[in-house]
Image (spheres, grey):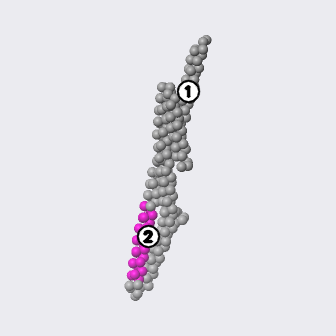
Amino acid sequence: MEAHETSELVEDAMGDKSKTRTALTISVFAMVLAFASLGGSNAAKESTQENILAANAYSFYQAKTIRQTSLKIAAADMELQLLKEPGMPAPAKEAFQKKIDEYQKTVARYESEPENKEGKKELMVQAKGHEATRDHALRQDPWFDYAEGMLQIAIVLLSVSMIGSIPALFYVGTLLGSLGFLATVNGYFLLI
C-alpha cells in the first residue's frame, strides 16, 4: 500500500466519522424538537384553558354581585315600607322583618362561602389564580416557538452539511440547534 492510498483511506474514514457525528447531532436535535413541540402545545392549551376558567370565575363573581345587589335593594325597600307604615299589623311586620333578615343573610353568604368556595371573595382568588397560571403559560409559549424554528433550521443545515460535506454548515447548524436547546430549556423553566 502506498502513501497516497493510505491518505485516501484516512480521508474516507474521517468523512464517515463526520457523517456519523452529523447524523447523531441531527437525531439529538430532532429529539429536542419533539420536546419543544410538546412543551409549546401544552403551554398553548394551558393558556387557553386557564383563560376560560378565569373568565368563568369572573362571570360567576359578577352574577353573585348582581344577585347580592338585587337582594340589598329588596331588603332596603322592605325596610322603607316598614318605616312608611308604622301601624302595620304585627304579623305583617314579623313577615317583613323575617324576609329582610333572610335577604341580609344571603347577601353576607354571597360575599364569602369558604365551605364551597363560591363566595365573591373565593371566586376572586380563583380567577386571579387562573390568570397567573395563564400568564405563566403565555410567557413559556414564545420560547417554544423560537426553539422549534431554530431546531428545524438546524436540522436542515446539518442535513445539507452531511450531504454536501460542508463543515461551515455543520457549525452553523450546531450553533442554531444549541440555541434551540437553550430556548427549549428556558421554555420549561423560564430562567430568562
Q: Tell me if I can see residue 34 in this picture.
A: no
Indicate which disc residue 18 carries.
1
Check the image and report above or below for 177 versus 49: above
Q: Amino acid at mark 1?
A: Ser
Is residue 35 one of those drawn in magenta?
no
**Along the line of sight, the residue nearer the viewer: 105 or 11:** 11
Give the residue drawn at x 49%, y 31%.
Answer: 169
- The spot of residue 15 in percent (x, y) is 55, 23
Magenta segment:
59-82
> Comparing marks 2 and 1, which lies closer to the viewer?
1
Is residue 77 one of those drawn in magenta?
yes
**Along the line of sight, the residue nearer the viewer: 123 or 33:** 33
User: CA separation, marks 2 and 1?
Assistant: 74 Å
Tell me if mark 1 has few (under 14), some (14-19) or many (20+) residues whose alpha carbon lies within 10 angstroms of its own: some
Give the residue drawn at x 49%, y 41%.
Answer: 147
Secondary structure, mark 1, is helix
Check the image and report above or below for 191 versus 113: above
The numbered mark, 2 or 1, whose residue comes first in the sequence reads 1
Check the image and report above or below for 104 versus 40: below
Q: Tell me if I can see residue 146 in this picture.
A: yes
**Along the line of sight, the residue nearer the viewer: 169 or 146:** 169
As drawn, the residue found furthest toward the front would be: 3
Indicate which disc residue 76 carries.
none
Name the magenta segment's main secondary structure.
Answer: helix
Give the residue drawn at x 44%, y 61%.
Answer: 58
Quadrant occupied by the N terminus: top right
The residue tagged 2 is 68
As drawn, the residue found furthest toward the bottom would be: 87
Q: Amino acid at mark 2?
A: Gln
- The spot of residue 87 in percent (x, y) is 40, 88
